[in-house]
Image (cartoon, rainbow, N blue to C red):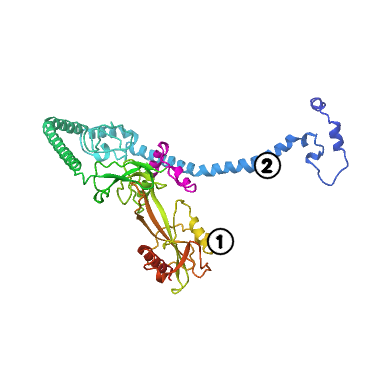
Amino acid sequence: MKLVSNSLFSDLSESETCRKSFLGAPKRYCSSVSQYANQSCPSQSLPAYLIIIEYFVILKLLLWPILFAFFSKTAKNVDDEADKIWRFQLYSLAEDFRLRPPLPPPLTILCLICSACCRFSDSFSGFFSDFDHPDFEHRDKNRATWRFGSIYNNPSVPFNKNDFVTSFWRKLSMEQWKNTHQKSNVSTNKNELQELHNIHNHIRMMTLRDSYEKSGSRKASEAHFLEQYPESSGIMKINVKLMSKPWSVLVPRYNPPFYCKPAEDFPSDVQKYIDVATEQNVGELKRIWRSRQANDVISNSGKCWKLSAAGFPLNPNGRTGMAGRGNHPRFGANRRCFYIVLSGGVQSTCQVLVDSHKSVPNEWHLENSSKDEHLTSILKMIGISDSDAHMFSMRRLDTSIVTADKRIPSNDTSPARLASQVAENENDTDNAWTEHDVWAISLRERRILPTIIGYSWLPTSAIRGTLPTWQADLVFRAKTNYGL
């Protein structure tokens, strides 16, 4: 034994480096694992640190919590499954004992004889012949069918639980016989309905033909004639009679010329707002207007756009004898804003700003931004500071019309929208028209210039007879809204 041990340990030797590190002066504390302070020794090498990190970090901190989480997740499912298996085993054991003969084995032959006799007679049926298993049905004594199971049924054949399969074929044969013998009656009724439909279409076509003939046989004095379109050379439009203007009136031969003023003829500051009706852009314009119409219907707004068969918007005032946008920069509504600028905080000093034409300031408004640049320039012209001018010209997010009974707070600086109505203009066409938007602001007691070039202040008590009637009514309405 000593020879074997000596031979095994004789090959082991300690390196000089490890011996020197081990034979150092004794210390009061352990400087490293296994008392080897040299990193080149086996216990202090990089794999040793990796093993320690793997054990403490990966195994202890990561793998063990994940394993415990898996166990906690599956423990409840395993318990439920084991409980079901245990109940099934108990139920199977009880069923085995129930189906065994009630007499002991020496007398088992008697039980079998009694069971055989009960099969041919109904005696003792409750004890021997009937099954009380919950998965068996007892409606048919000659066959036992499983209540719970996978049964394939032909999808083309309807299945009724309490009917025989032959009843389906019996009903099907009866329906086939009825269809065969009643086919003549059904075909007769169809022929009568088709004939009635043809008569209805014939009457409708005769009515339309009569209306076209009447429209074609009008006198020359009643026929439409052409007239000059304003601000254009050689552009003619149809003179539409008053009775033919509404879109609800059918005018079969109405085919007005299509005209759009070139973008180059507009001022440079307006050209960026123009709807260019070229062949490339017409399709996109139609798509935009159809999308607007669909959005207004979905949002239940009160605009209710009416579009022509070509997809362009229709003038609410009716026919004008000219299609396209004409001299307007845009299809649809071209808004002209009227500004009622009130100054003074009491009734006696309240005054309104008017222009040289004895009208409230107005300007075409083509941009869709929330800030009104033209109103800002007017306020700066009458002496309002830049910050206040920008504040008064910022519109509300809600641009709904302010009713006459609503009172606007004194600290509200946003302009109030009093009215928006369709107006008639000589440049209007079937697809472009003019709308008047009336906005009002109250400067209260802010300092203003008494004299302005191109504008003047008019006391509100003297506006009757000076301003147009509809503008005077809106000025008094603005005073009521602002409590002046």
Q: Which residue is mark 1?
A: 387
How far separated are the C-alphas under marks 2 and 1? Answer: 68 Å
204 and 36: which is toward the camera: 204
SS label for mark 1 = helix
Does residue 371 appear anywhere in the picture? no
Q: Residue 398's spot in the image, x, y percent?
A: 43, 58
Q: Quadrant of residue 259?
A: top left
Q: Range of the magenta residues?
A: 262-288
Q: Which of labels 2 and 1 is toward the front?
A: 1
The residue most toward the bottom is 348
Q: Residue 98's spot in the image, x, y percent?
A: 34, 39
34 and 400: which is toward the camera: 400
Image vertical order of residue 392 relative to residue 73, above or below: below
Judged left or right of residue 30, residue 445 is left
Q: Which residue is mark 2?
A: 56
Q: Which numbered marker is on residue 15? A: none
The residue most toward the front is 233
Image vertical order of residue 255 relative to residue 296, above or below: above
Q: Quadrant of residue 102?
A: top left
SS label for mark 2 = helix
Name which residue type carries label 2. Answer: Phe
Earlier in the chain: of badge 2 and badge 1, it is 2
The question of residue 150 being in magenta is answered with: no
Q: Residue 321's spot in the image, x, y percent?
A: 30, 45
Image quadrant occupied by the N terminus? top right
Name which residue type carries label 1. Answer: Ser
Q: Quadrant of residue 179?
A: top left
369 and 358: which is toward the camera: 358
The question of residue 285 being in magenta is answered with: yes
Image quadrant occupied by the C terminus? bottom left
Image vertical order of residue 112 relative to residue 272, above or below: above
